[in-house]
Image (cartoon, rainbow, N blue to C red):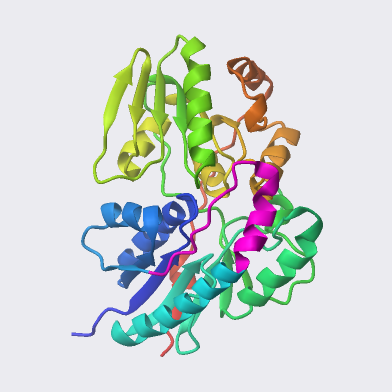
């Protein structure tokens, strides 16, 4: 009996978005008779271990990216940390070549992990950021990112090539000679017509300390609200914890099925404007309110783009108040998409001997 080909799939541990958008890809690998091996670190790895208790899960060196308390200083903190991050990428490359050897890997899918590729097997990079926004240094961060992408056989962009699309200028660059494939938006969720149980759902994620800062702020603001609220903190721990305080039900985190049901049965969602979140809400056709992570240019750009297109209102973290939710009536919400990704064609890259 022929052995199933093993594909290494490795999402970046930066918030939970990279890990959660790998879930439909992992499911598709299993359905197409591959054996996925998962590799990441921190909360991203913990989340995937819970989703796939029967798959091999390996730990990669951590990038240890944290935010500054002051959003404006994020870029400088990243620059200061960059020698350490580069060192970790080197460690990641070494770890990857050992995994390829030890586990007889036939292909690699890296979601934004710069060092997870191999010249010995077909390697794919998943990103929606062909243009990496960093203010006055955007040209430089974009050039550096392109250099990394070129080390891979293909780059899969989870968006539509044409307009209307979800990533705007982030995922669309001119005259690119990179091997790009626009694979369409990716989401682990399905839309379901469930009765509305919650007036507001809060869905938090992302690196500290900004996750905690927003959690505190929203907890205080939402005490003025009388409707039913579901508050998911985005803290991946050993087990799911649930507690109620008045009209607010708190969860530390949720698995995919529970989260899908909760989103489908919520009227409105307050969250960060991360790209995976936007793809998920578009799939479910949700009304939302976005609060981008301070200093994260990409989230600020996406929130601004969706506001300008009259889809989702947003404001920065310091300005948020419960009254801001009144703006929602003037916005259309994100439209659902029924896009089927042709995984058979995508995975044909790994079929060649």
Q: Residue at x 38, y 38 (%)?
A: 260
Q: Is residue 53 left or right of residue 25?
A: left
**Does residue 1 lie above or below 21 as drawn?**
below
Viewer can see residue 313: no
Which range of residues does the magenta coloring cover? 60-82
The quarter of the displayed image where residue 160 is located: bottom right
The foreground one among 67 and 4 is 67
User: x, y (%) of residue 46?
Assistant: 32, 54
Which of the two residues, 338 or 7, is positioned nearer the viewer here? 7
- Total count of labels: 0
Visible residue check, residue 143: yes
User: Quick one: which residue is furthest to the left in this view?
Assistant: 1
Q: Is residue 172 above or below residue 164?
A: below
Quadrant into which the C terminus falls: bottom left
As drawn, is 314 to the left or to the right of 206?
right
Q: Residue at x 62, y 14 (%)?
A: 323
Nearer to us in this view, 301 or 214: 214
Residue 313 higher or lower than 237, as above or below:
above
Q: Position of residue 123 (x, y in %)?
A: 49, 78
């Amino acid at each position: 009996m022929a052995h199933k080909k093993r594909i290494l799939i490795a999402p970046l541990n930066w918030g939970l978005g990279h890990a959660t958008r790998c879930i439909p890809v992992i499911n598709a690998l299993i359905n197409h008779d591959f054996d996925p091996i998962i590799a990441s670190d921190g909360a991203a790895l913990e989340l995937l271990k819970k989703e796939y208790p029967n798959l091999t899960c390996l730990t990669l060196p951590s990038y240890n990216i944290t935010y500054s308390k002051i959003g404006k200083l994020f870029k400088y903190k990243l620059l200061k940390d960059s020698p350490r991050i580069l060192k970790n990428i080197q460690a990641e490359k070494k770890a990857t070549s050992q995994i390829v050897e030890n586990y007889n890997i036939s292909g690699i899918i890296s979601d934004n992990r710069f060092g997870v590729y191999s010249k010995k097997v077909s390697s794919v990079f998943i990103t929606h950021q062909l243009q990496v926004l960093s203010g006055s240094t955007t040209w430089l961060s974009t050039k550096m990112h392109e250099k990394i992408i070129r080390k891979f056989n293909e780059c899969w962009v989870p968006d539509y090539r044409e307009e209307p699309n979800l990533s705007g200028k982030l995922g669309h660059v001119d005259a690119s000679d990179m091997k790009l494939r626009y694979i369409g938006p990716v989401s682990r969720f399905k839309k379901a017509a469930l009765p509305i149980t919650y007036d507001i759902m809060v869905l938090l994620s992302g690196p500290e300390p900004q996750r905690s800062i927003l959690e505190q702020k929203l907890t205080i603001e939402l005490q003025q609200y009388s409707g039913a609220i579901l508050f998911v903190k985005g803290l991946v721990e050993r087990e799911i914890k649930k507690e109620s305080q008045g009209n607010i039900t708190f969860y530390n985190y949720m698995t995919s099925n529970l989260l899908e049901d909760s989103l489908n049965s919520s009227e409105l969602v307050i969250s960060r404007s991360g790209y995976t979140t936007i793809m998920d809400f578009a799939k479910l056709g949700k009304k939302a309110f976005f609060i981008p992570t301070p200093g994260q240019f990409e989230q600020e750009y996406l929130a601004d783009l969706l506001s300008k297109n009259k889809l989702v209102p947003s404001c920065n973290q310091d300005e948020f108040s419960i009254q801001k939710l009144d703006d929602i009536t003037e916005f259309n919400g994100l439209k659902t998409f029924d896009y089927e990704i042709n995984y058979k064609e995508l995975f044909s890259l790994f079929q060649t001997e």
